[in-house]
Amino acid sequence: MTEKTKVGRMYLAVGCGAAIGSLLRFLAGVVIVDGLGQSVLWTTTFVNVVGSFIIMLFATSTGPEGRWPVGAMGRLFVMGGVCGGFTTFSAMSLDSYLLMLDASIVTGALYLGAVVLLSLAAAWCGHMLAVRINR
């Protein structure tokens, strides 16, 4: 396989994964906003927290000491594609900014800080679960 073909397949893996992740994010919004009647802020929080958990669970589980051997292409598909398409930093930034304009700077900053902390906690939980599974 030529280097050009290999790189093309990598782009395709990330692109296909991102399409799936984006559709899953959209569906999460439909369920949370339309189905449960919640604010779009909950959708953004949900996808970032769940995505952080999944990416760390997958990264640790498929890494060098992981139980599930997955090649570079599979890791790109899931981590760069699906998780990258599912999570959304830009929507979190927009939500925070709009809260700062509509409510107060403190409210927007608290929302932003809470989502970041929850996402980091979820990533830690995903890592710890994978470490336990890898034993």
Image (cartoon, grey):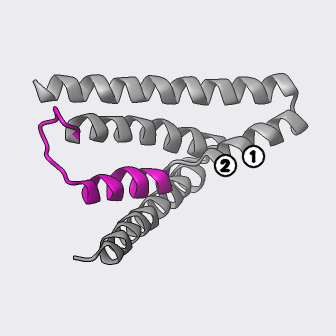
Q: Secondary structure at mark 1?
A: helix
Q: In this view of the protein, which residue sits in the foreground, 56 or 65?
A: 65
Residue stretch in magenta = 63-86
Asked which quadrant contains residue 57, the reply is top left
Q: Residues within 10 Å of mark 1 (few under 14, many from 20)?
A: few
Q: Horizontal placement of 126 versus 109: left or right?
A: left
Q: Position of residue 55 (x, y in %)?
A: 37, 41
Q: Which residue is mark 1?
A: 94
Tell me, yes or no, if residue 40 can be seen here: no
Q: Is residue 101 magenta?
A: no
Q: Residue furthest front?
A: 2
Q: Position of residue 15 (x, y in %)?
A: 43, 68
Q: Quadrant of the C terminus?
A: top left
Residue drawn where x is 49% and y is 61% of the image = 22
Q: Which residue is mark 2?
A: 91
Tell me which amino acid carries mark 1.
Leu
